[in-house]
Amino acid sequence: MNRRKFITSAAMAVSAPLILSQIKLFGADAPSNKLNLALIGTWGRGEAHFDALKTQNVVALCDINEDHLAFGAKQFPRAKQYFDWRKLLDDHQKLGLDGVVICTADHHHAFVSNWALNRGLHVYCEKPLANTIEEARIVRANYLSKKDKLATQVGMQRHAFQNFNRLRELIRDKAIGELTAAYAWGNRQIRRPGYYPAAGAPPSNLHYDLWLGPAPYHPYNPGYFRGGSGANCLEWNMFWDFGNGQVGDMGSHTMDLLWNVVDAEHATSAEASGEAFNPEVSPVTMESHYDNPANDWRGPIKISWYQGGAMPKSPKSWLDLKKIDHGAMFKGSKGFVVADFNNRLIIPVGDNADMTYYKSPSKDELIPTVNGFQQEWFAACKTGQKTSCNFDYSGTMIEQMLLGLVAYRVGKKIEYDGANGVVTNSSEANTYLSRNYRAGYTLNG
Ligand SMILES: NC(=O)c1ccc[n+]([C@@H]2O[C@H](COP(=O)([O-])OP(=O)(O)OC[C@H]3O[C@@H](n4cnc5c(N)ncnc54)[C@H](O)[C@@H]3O)[C@@H](O)[C@H]2O)c1
């Protein structure tokens, strides 16, 4: 099989349907072949899922804010209502649940995902999948142990943009020769000095203790809840106990642009630098660099992530990379590709970069487009097709980015044993791979 055929057929293979006898495993035997789903987080990002969810049966809703729960219930009046996702999952058999869609604050993501997978449920989880290396590894391992029965997807929906696969084809077809390095960056900058001070009792519609969930206690302050629908995450995701700032925020989307191309497994090392470490708030300006080993189609590469104004060096003085707020760049032996989410620019470099070594694919050789990102997950739940941002792909990606934050915190280059999830040259770094949680919340429950 030639290389082009391999690229296309590998992409087809992951979407090939399973034989009929296997379909039952995937919940396709629900009435009228619709999935019975629960939406956890029924306002904000949850709202972005309403239309897609209406094509299935939404049998349960959960939100820690009673007003937001009522907002979701207007759309899905027959769904049973919960404030606590643990109670909802306790009832999964009674509800006849097939899967959950998780749109909560980040610090619940890995918990709800693990609890759902452990109860045999399909999971769609908003990004980021995890806040610590331990969370990323456990949720990925749980998925891998059930990947022939359960479908997962992380909400990195830009992955369905055509540009993602066009980039993959360009690099794999050697448009810039042998790939040597890949860079991604995001320029969002939101500064907060530290956790907010106590500001009275939470309003009666807000189950604040359930919002804190596994996170250490912090007093209520309305500052965590003052954002508009779909943007409230920008009010809490920079505080370490609730999120990881830009790594988990736009970083999940932008690193996906790179990760989809490079077919990387675990990094063997990470180093990072940036503004001074703040024990309460994740950094705005930071960059992290990784060594990723060779795979079956390329040699070893360097991968880098930049945020909050830190940027890779532009290959040409006339190209101002800073004009791309969220972008990626690939460096090869014969040039560069620079991209944002929707566009790409090839820059051949040097007299030998005449492009004669590159043959563009024909239409029927292109990697098939993801036809609807949530629909891809629905189909996977029913038929066993693989999703593009399953917890294997997305789990490895967020683990690498979180490793960068660990390196940033210890302030030196760390060596990583990805098979075992251990830093081999810093005992301090190993203490930052996991966190302690409040009673009542077991990560792998
Ligand atoms: N894929 C994307 O493009 C995209 C865009 C925006 C947000 N997000 C992600 O979606 C998630 C939610 O972001 P948001 O801005 O809507 O935040 P938000 O603070 O508005 O929370 C969303 C909803 O979840 C509820 N909620 C929070 N914690 C809960 C819990 N433990 N149990 C039940 N309900 C809970 C909130 O009350 C709210 O109704 C974040 O993880 C964010 O990263 C993804």
Image (cartoon, helix red, strand yellow):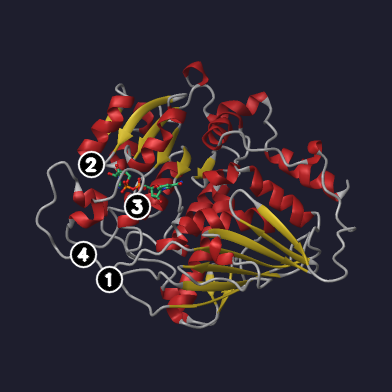
Q: Secondary structure at mark 1?
A: loop
- Confirm whether residue 263 shows in the render: no
Q: Amino acid at mark 3?
A: Cys
Distance, label 1 to label 2, CA atoms, is 26 Å
Of 295 and 283, which appears nearest the observer? 283
Q: Amino acid at mark 2?
A: Asn
Q: Residue at x 81, y 54 (%)?
A: 173
Q: Amino acid at mark 1?
A: Pro
Label pair 4/3, CB-CB below 8 angstroms: no
Q: Residues within 10 Å of mark 4 (few under 14, many from 20)?
A: some
Horizontal and vertical percent for residue 73?
Answer: 28, 28
Distance, label 2 to label 3, CA atoms, is 15 Å
Please report whichever mark, 2 or 3, sits nearer to the chain's N-terminal start: 2
Distance, label 1 to label 3, CA atoms, is 17 Å
- Residue furthest out toward the right: 356
Residue 396 quadrant: bottom right
Q: How many marks?
A: 4
Disc 3 residue lies near ligand 1 with CB under 8 A? yes
- Vertical placement of residue 194 versus 107, above or below: below
- Confirm whether residue 46 shows in the render: yes
Q: Residue at x 85, y 65 (%)?
A: 353
Residue 414 quadrant: bottom right
Horizontal and vertical percent for residue 387?
Answer: 59, 41
* Apparent side of residue 267 relative to residue 223 in the rendered image (left or right): right
- Residue furthest out toward the top: 32
Q: Nearer the viewer, mark 1 or mark 2?
A: 1
Identify the disc placed on residue 233. Answer: 3
Residue beneath disc 4: 196
Identify the disc placed on residue 193. Answer: 1
